[in-house]
Image: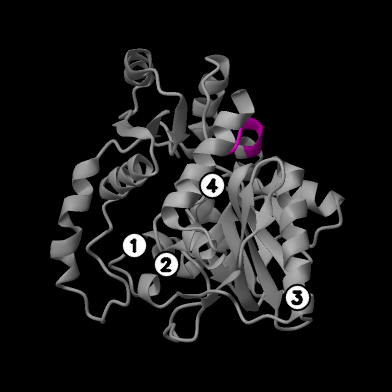
Amino acid sequence: MKVAIVFNEVNPEIYENLQRSAKNLDFKPVFDLQSLNPLNEFEFMAESLRKAGYEAYTFNIMDSIQSFIKDYEKNKPDVVFNLVELYKDQPRLEMNFTGLLELLNITYTGAPPIALGTCQNKTLTKRILSSLGIRTPRYKIIKNMEGSFRLGLTYPLIVKPAWEDASVGIDNDAIVNNVEALKKRIEYVFNSFKQPALVEEFIMGRELNVAVFGDKDPVVLPISEIDFSQMPKNLHPIVSFQAKWDPMHEAYHKTIPICPAPLSDKIRIEAERMALECVHAVGTRDYSRVDMRLSKEDNKLYVLEVNPNPDLTEGAGFMRSAKYGGYSYRKTLKMIVDFAYARKH
């Protein structure tokens, strides 16, 4: 079987300066900064699939649908391992690329267009989950700066762009404690992201990542927790954009994963049930992650987001849970390819 690992990195050269910049950090990094170049990770994935017995190669579409089609017609892969997360710098076009794959009847991994579009719209996702009785933080959607900002929500609040993912637009200032700070942050979202602002009650408590693996009969992998105990006092206990993606930021090194998370059987079983309900509700498949908070106040679980096609870096996120679930990195990648192939054959 031939597998094309397809991604979209328009400026790959930006990763070449990370290691040099690391020398100027004013804190001791926790995580290794040698493996931050995603291009290396994609090639490592290809090598792992080759060791699993597949013919695999990587292809960067570089914002060009035409180049992808040309490569597909030339190499005729049996499965496209879809790692395209944005197009023309627009996350909302992620679903359009999978739409193209559907139109061309190309076998691909991960979530279909409708699931990607649904999860991109945080408000729509919350409405779907709430309609099924799945608990999410209380919220309001703000579309303009008119009217009262007394929203009937309990502070502290967290303000997010309504149509982004991967923690884009979420930094330390996203947490607000009064009306003036709320107005300022909403205005920031409008000006910077040109979209409505999602205002949620901030759930103080433990943050859990619940990975779900499979297509027709998905299973929940061991739950991971983000430990905020090393976070300095000037930073809020959140998984901000910087904590996820900026290795030069202290938050990146002070959000420490613990897997499996130390949970009571009751909480673990409930989290597993909620995660499966979430992925069925929005239609993700193959591999997903549901982010939750376990409230310190009432010991209840609240779903923050459903993430289709989460990061597959070895030793991080989804793959960490897969490892503790008994799936090696190579086996997990192979199974994701097999899920996709089985759908069309």
* Amino acid carrying mark 1 in the image: Asp
Question: In the visual, does 92 lie left or right of 302?
Answer: left
Which disc is residue 243 wearing?
A: 2
Look at the numbered discs 1 and 2 and tell me whether their residues touch, using CB distance below 8 Å.
Answer: yes
Report the predominant secondary structure element of the magenta stretch. Answer: helix
| Res 340 quadrant in image | top right
Q: Residue visible at 37% across and 13% down?
A: 73
Q: Which residues, given as a range, are shown in magenta?
A: 111-115
* Residue depth check, mark 3 versus mark 2: number of the one nearer the observer: 3
* Amino acid carrying mark 4 in the image: Glu
Question: In the visual, does 227 lie left or right of 276?
Answer: left
Q: Is residue 295 visible?
A: yes
Position in image of residue 190 (x %, y %): 53, 48
Q: Residue visible at 46% across and 46% down?
A: 333
Position in image of residue 234 (x %, y %): 43, 82
Residue named by callout 3: 267
Residue named by callout 4: 164
Quote the CA–CA distance across marks 1 and 4.
Answer: 17 Å
* Amino acid carrying mark 3 in the image: Ile
Residue 114 sits inside the magenta stretch: yes
- Above or below — where is 35 with respect to 238? above
Position in image of residue 169 (x %, y %): 48, 55
Residue named by callout 1: 246
Within 10 Å of disc 3 (Cα), the crowding (few <14, some 14-19, many 20+) is some
* Amino acid carrying mark 2 in the image: Ala
Quote the CA–CA distance across marks 2 and 4.
Answer: 16 Å
Give the colour scheme shown.
one colour
Quote the CA–CA distance across marks 3 and 2.
Answer: 26 Å
* Residue depth check, mark 3 versus mark 4: number of the one nearer the observer: 3
> In the rendered view of the protein, which quadrant contains the C terminus?
top right
